[in-house]
Amino acid sequence: MAAVVGPRTWTVSELTAHIKGLLLNDAPLRDVWVEGEISNFVQYTSGHCYFSLKDAHATLQCVMWKSHAVWLPELPQDGQHVLVHGHIDVYGPKGTYQLYVDFLQPAGVGDLYAQFEALKAKLEAEGLFAPERKRPLPRWPQRIGVVTSPDGAALRDIVRVIRSRYAGVELVLSPTLVQGAEAPARIVAALTALIEHGNVDVILIARGGGSLEDLWAFNDEQVARAIAASPIPVVSGVGHETDFTIADFVADLRAPTPSAAAMAVVPDGQELRRQLQEYRHRLTQHLQTLLLAKRRQLQEEHRALRMHHPQSQLNAARQRVDEWHRRMILSFAHTLTLARTRVTALAERLHALNPRAVLQRGYAIVQHTDGRIISSVTHIQVGEHLYVFLQDGRLEAWVVDRRRELGKEDTGQRRRTNT
Amino acid sequence: MSDKPLEEMTFEEALHQLEQIVQRLEGGNLPLAEALALYEQGVQLVARCHTLLDEAELRIQQLVPDGEGGYTFEEFQGPLDSR
């Protein structure tokens, strides 16, 4: 609440709430051990108990709810000297502060709280609570040892939880007393038997809820040391969520209840099924992916194979032959054209040299009837026949006279015509 | 990888082997025949795990002194009928 400057008027409720807040925020008042003498003890039919604690100089109002009072072995008497545990709170309607008691025992039986604290400090100093001493629990225990009472609620809870989660394990019960004077020794013996003969992977040490005294065996030094010395991981599940015992501090894992201890050691069947489902899905999916890839690869190879098929090679060869054929034809045609050109040229030249061409210009060729070309008057005698070739035909004539012109020699002796 | 027959595998062994198979399949580059064999094996392991989960019957034993300083196991007969 904010600081108040100047006069400030509270309502009663406001002020009470403020005080209540102060008390509830004070750590020591939340966890109080008090010794005193009981007076005005009364238990209502509701089961709740009301009384005062007093000493020579002061009185403290106390309430003990039914939920705690049921654990009392017997109701306290006025004038009895007791040790109680609880927390301080304000009861607004009556404007009183009270101790809300959750534990009560006759004083002088021994100061349990002091014992508890002393043992805790001692073992802690020895390093038995050190986090690095805590071992991991096996992920898949086959055999689970249980140190508890064969007819207690703890065993029933453990069995129920394991059946509902994953029943594929074996439980090995090492029965023991879990409360009373003999309990610590029996617990140690049961734990030792389990370690030596049980062939188990993990050990649950458990007890259902009870009063501080009921759980006291789990605050025993020998029990604590036996747990600490266990070569097999130990899970403690003693009492309710709010109960802490020395056994809890030395165990490899402290579970708030026996059920929680069981839950901590066996895997969750539902979770396993989900995991299996996922594996199955992944298996199928990856096989399908693989098959698809292989199919693609196959198609690829098939295509490649077709490309290398002899037929396709044959086709390619055939194509090459055709190609060469085509080129050969082309080149042949070219040669032919060249040849033709040359022939034409030669023919023209030949034609130009044809003696008959001369005839067209008015010359004539004279031939003896025996076929000789007459290129000299000496080649023929008077009276002999001859042919005269003109451009358009042949005349036959005979020599009437011949006369030689001086200085002219015969030069065409060997030339012949084809007639 | 274990050579144990499927029927003799514990849940843990079967699940572990299943994990390995899934990982190998996911690793890829397996010959088809091997992949198919792995898949087949994986599916059988899944079935085995389910069977183990479905048929699991919690067995409860009790350590009992044998009177000679040792202990024997007995089936636990106590009342547990809070199912």
Image (cartoon, coloured by chain):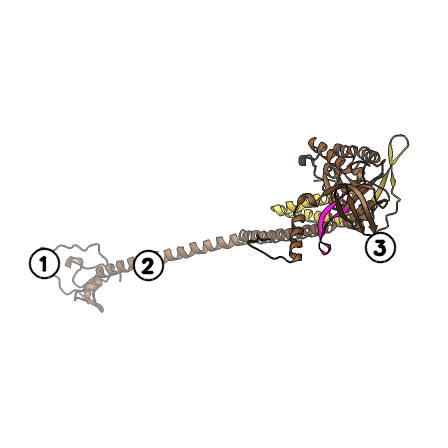
Chain colours: A brown, B yellow
Q: Can residue B14 be seen in this view?
A: yes
Question: Of A40 and A349, which appears nearest the observer?
Answer: A40
The amino acid type of the residue labelled 3 equals Thr
- Is A370 left or right of A141, judged from the image as shown? left
Quarter location, residue B17: top right
Residue lying at the far left in this picture: please name it.
Answer: A406
Q: Where is residue A100 in the image (x, y as percent from the top left)?
A: 75, 48
For marks 3 and 1, give the CA distance.
190 Å
Q: Main secondary structure of the magenta part?
A: strand
Q: Give the range drawn in magenta.
A: A84-101
Q: Is mark 1 on a helix, strand or loop?
A: loop
- Is A167 left or right of A329, judged from the image as shown? right
Residue under numbered circle 2: A337
Q: Is residue A207 visible?
A: no
Any magenta on residue A366? no
Question: Of B62 and A342, which appears nearest the observer?
Answer: B62
Tags 3 and 1 on a common chain: yes
Residue under numbered circle 3: A45
Residue under numbered circle 1: A405
